[in-house]
Amino acid sequence: MTRPNILYIVSDDLGYADLGCYGGRQAGFGAVSPNIDALAAGGLKLTEGYSNSPVCSPTRFAMATMRYQYRLRGALDEPINSRSKGSATLGLPPEMPTLPSLLKDAGYRTALIGKWHLGYPPHFGPLRSGYEEFFGIMAGGVDYFTHCSSSGDHDLYINDETHKEVGYLTDVFSNKAVAHVRERAAEARSGTPFFLSLHYTAPHWPWE
């Protein structure tokens, strides 16, 4: 059996009723979420799903590990923010199995484009928790235009190195994801599947 490629899309702080297909209000210019509504109309709507936490980074601990997040030290501190840089305790432990690490062990190519928010290098980071490639932010939220965190630090990375790039962050992530899928398509056709996590910061603060 051919193993499927997986594109795992996460929106940040999107409420259940913010989407048209779940009863969200209609904006003056038309549907609130026409593309997502179309996917729901032609596929599957999940009506009994619940976030594992009401706040940001603990939810991400749960999504990454599929565990009750408060069993992990880093998930008890909300939010993990720029003040935790250099901390050896506030983050996702690299020895903890994650969805990307298990898929990587199963022969998948793994990448994260977008928001991490599970601890800072050198002790933590996407490359220590199963991802082979990372393009995105480490912080909980950044300015969509300057890519700086609330502390003023530039927070856009390629792997563990800071990276400067011009563009509105949602568009930058989308364009990188499209390029990544195209790059991995040939490998996938030859039998090496890929797992791409596309974790947007939108519609999370700041509202830009």
Image (spheres, rainbow, N blue to C red):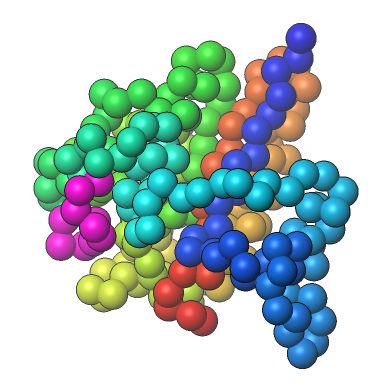
Q: How far across and how far down the image is residue 135, in percent?
A: 47, 49
> In the shown orientation, is residue 34 left or right of residue 75?
right
Residue 158 in view, yes or no: no
Q: Is residue 10 visible?
A: yes
Q: For the view shown, which residue lies furthest in the right direction?
A: 42
Vertical relation: 49 (above or below) 107: below
Q: Is residue 8 magenta?
A: no
**Residue at the image point whose x is 66% and y is 19% from the top:** 192
Magenta stretch holds residue 79:
yes
From this viewpoint, which residue is outermost toward the bottom? 28
Q: Tell me what residue is drawn at x 15 percent, y 62 percent.
A: 83
Q: Nearer the viewer, residue 133 or 60?
A: 60
Closer to the camera in the image, 100 or 79: 79
Q: Tell me which segment is drawn in magenta.
A: 75-84
Q: Position of residue 202 (x, y in %)?
A: 53, 67
Indicate the quadrant containing the N terminus: top left, top right, bottom left or bottom right: top right
Indicate whether 190 appears above or below 201: above
Q: Quadrant of residue 80?
A: bottom left
Foreground residue, 188 or 21?
21
Position of residue 180 measured from the top left corner of the image (x, y, whole percent): 64, 42
Is residue 201 rendered to the left or right of residue 175? left
**Residue 121: image x %, image y %?**
23, 44
Vertical side of 104 occupied by 128: above or below: below
Please name the residue shown 85% across and 54% down the image: 41
How many numbered discs, if any? 0
Kindly give the residue lying farthest to the top in the view shown: 1
